Amino acid sequence: MRNFRIFTKLFLTHSAVGLFALITLSVIFYNQLRDALIERTLDQLSSINILKKELVENYLFRSQQNLEALQVENKFLALYHELLEHHATAQTNQDIADIGNLQKLFDFKNLHVFDTHHRQLFSTDEEMYPDGLLSRIDSAISKDPSKIRIIDASAHALGDQTLLFYYVPIMEENKLIGIVLVQENFKKVQNILVETTGMGSTGESYIVGGDYRMRSTSRFFPDTLPGLIEVKTPAVENLFRGQPGPGLLKDYRGVSVLSAYRLIENRDLNWAIISEIDEEEAMRPIVSLRNYLVVIIALLIFVTLIVTYILSNAIVKPILRLKEIILTLSEGMMPAKVKLKTSTDEIGEMAKAIHQLTEGLERTAIFANEIGEGNFNASFTKLSENDKLGQSLIEMRDELRGFHERELKSARARASALLEGQERERKRIINELHDGVGQLLTIIRMQVDLLDIDDKSKGDIKTQINDAITEVKRISYHVMPQAIVDFGLEAALKGLCDTMSRYSGIVIDFKYIHEYDQKLDFEISISLFRIVQEGLNNIAKHAQASHVTLHLLDKEDEVYCILEDNGKGFKETDLVNYAGSGLRNIRERAMLLNGSAEINSRPGSGTTIEIHIPK
Amino acid sequence: MKIRILLADDHPMIRAGFKSMLDKSERFEIVGEAGNGKELIEVAGELNPEIILVDISMPVMSGLDVLEELSIRVPGVRLIVLTMHEEREYILQALKSGAAGYLLKNIERFELERAIITVYEGGKYFSPVVTNILAEAVSKPETNDVSEVTPREKEVLELVARGNSTKQIADLLGISVRTVESHRINMLKKMKVNNSAELIKKAIELKILS
């Protein structure tokens, strides 16, 4: 069971419950109905059986009465005498003719008159009776031969026909002098039985004699002599054992039938009358009901299948979707953002949980990614109090940030130490140039005057020495202006602007505003000077500008510097190319002091450099 | 009477050069020499010279600091700076500190003599290059036209007066920090003041701000 898919499980349980209920109900219902049907059918059979019995009994009784009436009139005695003494015949004697008419009137099969020696005196037909018939009748009447009797003379030995006779004694002065034998027309009894209205196609009523032989013709074997059919069925056996009553049993054909049976109440006859119908036919309505039930069960299974399919899909689909998400997660990928249709059942709750999981993981992943990309300011809210991964990532971020900051600090320290050393070295160099080479050149120049040469040569030499001095000054200025050491940034920048204007012809609008009066750090000063120097050099070299604005705002917390030209500008993409190294130096210088440099330019509208250096 | 001159330079060779240059003239007498600022002050007090030729970049005590000190210690002395520096800051600073002359070291003998005599006689003397620089320094055109203060500048000014930082102003007006700063600088220029405090004061005086 646990290896089945949900669909199979649901289907099996649904089917099991549904089928169990339906089959139980069906069986109960079916049995109840069957019992009721059997009972009703048996009741019906029973009443038919009674009716047939009454009809047969009445018929026999009436025939007997008619014969009795004739006896009382001494009709037969008179007839006997006529026959015996006068040898009269039907053609000669009226009475004899009347007898024939009577036989026809009462529809007897025939009528015979015998003397006590079994000599036939008269017969209504020519039929010959089988041997032994009269001896059978004799033995039947031997007890009391003076009464009218009904005699069942049917016997295998007598040709399997049903032979039913009325025995009428001819008495004179209490002495038997002759016998009248009237053969009943059994067809008439048969007709009573043949009437099968309300008994369907298999229902029949029939009569069985004490010898377990059929007396009436079977509905199923109309061409077989009744005496050939042995009816040793439980019904007949029960009857002859004195146990009447209807029941479900096997009939003479071996077919299961519903049967109602009774003994015919007649002093002389040991007959059973039985009314039966095949169980199959009686049960036919219930069979069709059973078929309906089978169809309904099949239908139910089908409906269960469909309902289960829909239901299991409704259950399984979100589960499979969640499975996909979990699989994707387990493969280290983020599932595509799909808003799950959330129900409020357990699956919905699970979907929510997985959604939360996904979101958490996504958040964590984004966080980890940000750390990976070096964004150590990324913030992260732990997924829960005990979010170990989140905690580790936060710790990692903090450690990396610390490491990064230390690294940055030390890199900055190294860089600024390098720059500082460089500047110190430059200071030394300009000192050497000024006080060493410059002074030496001045001395040499003075000594030229002492030479014993003509004035023109002196002038030439002096001019050359002057040029050398100017060159030394120019070099020295580029290495580091003495003014920044002695007077600070403003003076140095002013000097720089003057020089720049003088040599390049660019008008420089220089303004230095001291919002704050303390002297600027030399480090900041020299950096800003270098930045401006770099910027102005760039302008002079590339910008083709005619006007430059250089404003510095020396505030309490920072120095703000803007350098703007009206030159040709450049495309942002060119920033990395030709203007690159100079502008990059500006940025790096600013960054070494924790400041920033923003460079904006558009072709045709000049370039603006803004610098913020914090103090 | 010869003019009594004291020579101060940290290079003996330079001193020797100028000494021999001045010795050629009957009018001058080199009364002493000094190799640094400290020595100069001591020697000047003792020798009481009429003219001191001083280099402004000397060890121990720089020339510019020495100038002021000398004006106090040796009353009546006339100071002439003799230097390699031709940046205007040096020139202006030297003048402020009491120098009557500013000469570059590549000066010719006759010009040196003329300079000393001019200064000795109460005048001032500058090398031609120095004169040019001085002329440039004072000829900067600056405007102070209040009517040119634009409404936006006035707006910025009002916010500055209320104590807002540049960043706050930029956010309030929806403009860049740069624009705010340039408005501010433009106003400082227009009003010829050096910082925001002065700017606000002047703006109130001029009834731009109430």
Image (cartoon, coloured by chain):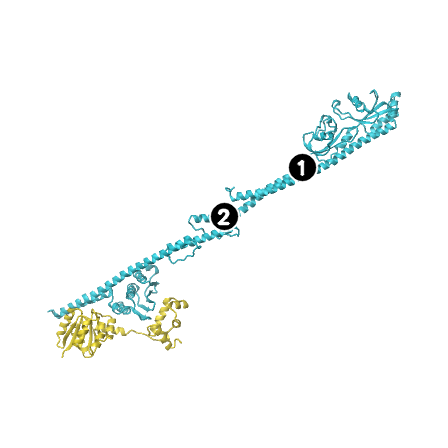
Kindly indicate which chain is depicted in yellow in the rendered structure.
B
**Percent coordinates x, y for residue A180 in the rendering:** 83, 24
User: Which mark is on residue A138?
Assistant: none
Which chain is rendered cyan in the image? Answer: A
The answer to whether residue A291 shows anywhere in this view is: yes
Residue drawn at (83%, 20%) of the image: A117
Q: Chain ID for label 2? A: A
Q: Secondary structure at mark 2?
A: helix
Q: Residue at x 56, y 46 (%)?
A: A307
Q: Amino acid at mark 1?
A: Arg
Name which residue type carries label 2.
Ile
The reply to whether dot 2 and dot 1 touch (C-beta < 8 Å) is no
- Rendering quarter of residue A38: top right
> In the rendering, at what x and y percent does residue A587 appear?
32, 61
> Callout 2: 10 Å neighbours few (<14), some, many (20+)?
some
- Report whether residue B111 is seen: no
Between A558 and B23, the residue placed more toward the observer is A558
Q: Which residue is mark 2?
A: A319
Label total for image? 2
Q: In this rendering, which labeled residue sits more in front, label 2 or label 1? A: 2
**Circle nearer the N terminus (2, 1):** 1
Q: Looking at the rendering, which quadrant does residue A238 occupy?
A: top right
Given residues A480 and A354, the one toward you in this image is: A354
Instruction: Determine crowd level at label 1: few under 14, some 14-19, many 20+ residues with C-alpha closer than 10 A.
Output: few
Indicate the quadrant where residue B191 lies: bottom left
Q: Which residue lies under the disc numbered 1?
A: A284
